[in-house]
Amino acid sequence: MAGTIAGDSVLLERADGVAVLTLNRPAAKNAIDIPTTDALTAALRALCADDEVRAVVLTGAGGDFCAGGDVKGMGEGASRTVEQRRAGMARYADLARALMALDKPLIAAVDGVAFGAGLSMALYADIVLVSTRVRMAMVFHRIGLVPDVGAWYQLPRVVGMQRAKELIYSAREFGADEAVRMNLALEALAPEALMPRASALARSLARASPTAFSLSKRALAATLQSDFDTMLEMEASSQVIASSSAYFREAIRRFAAKEPAQFRWPREDDEE
């Protein structure tokens, strides 16, 4: 099933438990203006609440992921009051919270440009796949702005504090190989292989236990702000919940019957 949101600026497709969200402003390299930001936030919240959706892919149309915020719109807002500017930033905060709250597998398929807020959004993905022609940058300091969509929080957790400082302060561009080396991306693929690989991973993760995935995702989000004993307690409580699920009971039955497991991580050469 397919549908459109916000005047076609965000596309949504659903099939076999996987939702694909596509930023669809290719003429602007999928820069997010106010309607697109609001539409993306609403879509993420709706998908979070949709039990039929088990995994989400976020990508961009026309060979680019997202060029960041709509710079033309920013220029038009130069005369706004402080209150109006803070209201605008509240939209980015809402988007960041919607990305953080998604307790399902989120895969970012990043092609072409991923600048500014575009790169910030990718940081929330559980798995980031990039094409070999990707161009990424925390460009904010080039125009006298600071990172947004929660990048101050997310970037150090993904690449480490020293590298996060360098990327933010320099606002430099980097490509696929470096993104993989700094653990910002898991895999770099040819552009034509990007969405097939993202789809294969999403279909695979859609067959994993939603209970176990959600519990692990929440724990991993908390671990850098928690101590050892707190994480052990979270581990114990979560395992009690996971071992009470129907998914676990079916997994044990299949194991005992020597039947194929429900979940299998796809290799890069899998055609599924």
Image (spheres, rainbow, N blue to C red):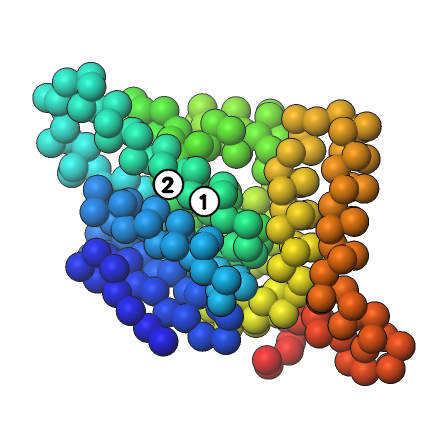
Residue 121 appears in the rendering? yes
Q: Position of residue 91 (x, y in %)?
A: 29, 35
Determine the secondary structure under disc 2.
Answer: helix
Residue 113 seen from this side? no
Q: Which residue is mark 2?
A: 95
Tag 1: amino acid: Leu
Residue ranking furthest to the right: 256
Residue 99, numbered circle: 1
Above or below, 70 against 110 in this view is above
239 left or right of 122? right
Residue 208 relative to residue 176: left or right: right
Q: Are marks 1 and 2 in contact (CB under 8 Å)?
A: yes
Q: Residues within 10 Å of mark 1 (few under 14, many from 20)?
A: many
The x, y position of residue 148, in whole percent, is 38, 31
Instruction: Name the quadrant of the N terminus.
Output: bottom left
- Would you place residue 163 above or below residue 17 in this image? above
* Residue at screen point 44% across, 32% down: 150
